[in-house]
Image (cartoon, rainbow, N blue to C red):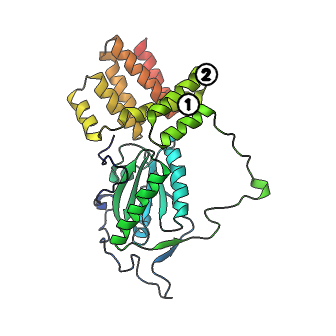
Amino acid sequence: MSDLPPNPTSLRGAVDLSSLVNRAMMPAQGTAAGGPAGSADGADVGVVELPSLYFEGTDANFNDFLDLSATVPVVVDLGAEWSEPSKQLSSILDRVVQDYAGRLVLVRVDAGANPQLAQAFQAQSVPAVAAVIAGRPVQLFDGVIPEQQVREVFEQLLQLAAQNGVTGRASVPTDSNAVEPSDETVEPTPEPLPPHHAEAYEAIERGDYKTAIAEYKTAIAQDPRDAMAVAGLAQVSLLDRLAGISMDAIRTGAAEAPTDVDAQLLVADLDISGGHVEDAIDRLLTLFPRLDADGKDWVRSRLLDYFEIVGVDDPRVTKARARLTSLLY
């Protein structure tokens, strides 16, 4: 699914982000204290005051976080609104960053809406997690991994940051990241997930996609109208198909075999996982008329999965469904 090493706790070497920001990056040993030049009032140069530990990053505003990364390591959460695994991982990252009490800052990026950042961080699937230290990106891991492994990754990240002089801390208002709601704004506690959904979520968190698939299938067998289970099964099946396969191998295989159904389905999976919905759907619909009956069944089934993943009410799905219908009849 990516060219990351098998061990999700390994850190990869930094690469230049200058093509994104169009300016020279700060050198790795930018300041002795890992922060910007001292202020006139003599404040601690290793501490930066921020309104929160959590931010939304975009192609337009990311320069601000590159500057911040000279003082505090910036964790980048690349996800997609439609991706349930992205939401699961974001919840884990929120908890872990909170526990680090300002030693890390989290920037959440919608990979589909911010293609420059997705490309700069080589995000070929979502969710993916990277970091920026002294203006230089470091790719950490992709997919949902257990919370303990996330903590191990961040410990290594902090070690790498210290080696590069980035040892500062973010100072935020005490109530900025844990606001207690007033009586008027208290929301009801959400109902617990149905048992098979809960088991599937736990399995996804530990990377056990086979078990998650089995749980969703059981939920659907018990209630064929369980839309959440249908969508969940489509999402985790995609993750399972891509697990352990490098991005380069997938794209090379598709380029070398443009009429091979399996190769084209796999590269379409890769596109969907990276938020390139229209590319994936167009690839399969263009291939569809040239296939035999079995091939058409495979492609149709995969497209229906994609419709569930993206959302049946999404305009791109509505358009694709009409095009598929015209090809069928």
Q: Amino acid at mark 1?
A: Asp
Q: Residue at x 37, y 50 (%)?
A: 8
Per the model, the C-alpha gap separating discs 2 and 1 is 25 Å
User: In the rendering, at what x and y percent does residue 207 appear?
Assistant: 44, 41
| Of the image marks 2 and 1, the number of the one nearer the N terminus | 2
* Crowding at mark 2 (Cα within 10 Å: few <14, some 14-19, many 20+): few
- Does 258 appear above or below 110? above
Q: Amino acid at mark 2?
A: Gln
- Does 252 appear above or below 2? above
Left or right position of 126 against 175: left
User: Circle 2 sits in a helix, a strand or a loop, which is it?
Assistant: helix
| Residue 313: image tag | 1
User: In the rendering, at what x and y percent does residue 137 appear?
Assistant: 34, 60
Q: Residue at x 52, y 45 (%)?
A: 88
- Please give the residue where the numbered disc 2 appears in the rendered image: 222
Q: Quadrant of residue 254?
A: top left
User: In the rendering, at what x and y percent does residue 98 appear?
Assistant: 55, 61
User: Circle 1 sits in a helix, a strand or a loop, which is it?
Assistant: loop
- Does 86 appear above or below 195? below
Q: Which residue is at the front of the view, 113 or 164?
A: 164
Q: Quadrant of residue 70?
A: bottom left
Q: Is residue 82 visible?
A: no
Q: Which residue, as the protein is rendered here, is positioned at the far left?
A: 256
| Residue 26: image tag | none
* Crowding at mark 1 (Cα within 10 Å: few <14, some 14-19, many 20+): few
Left or right position of 188 against 243: right
Q: Quadrant of the C terminus?
A: top left
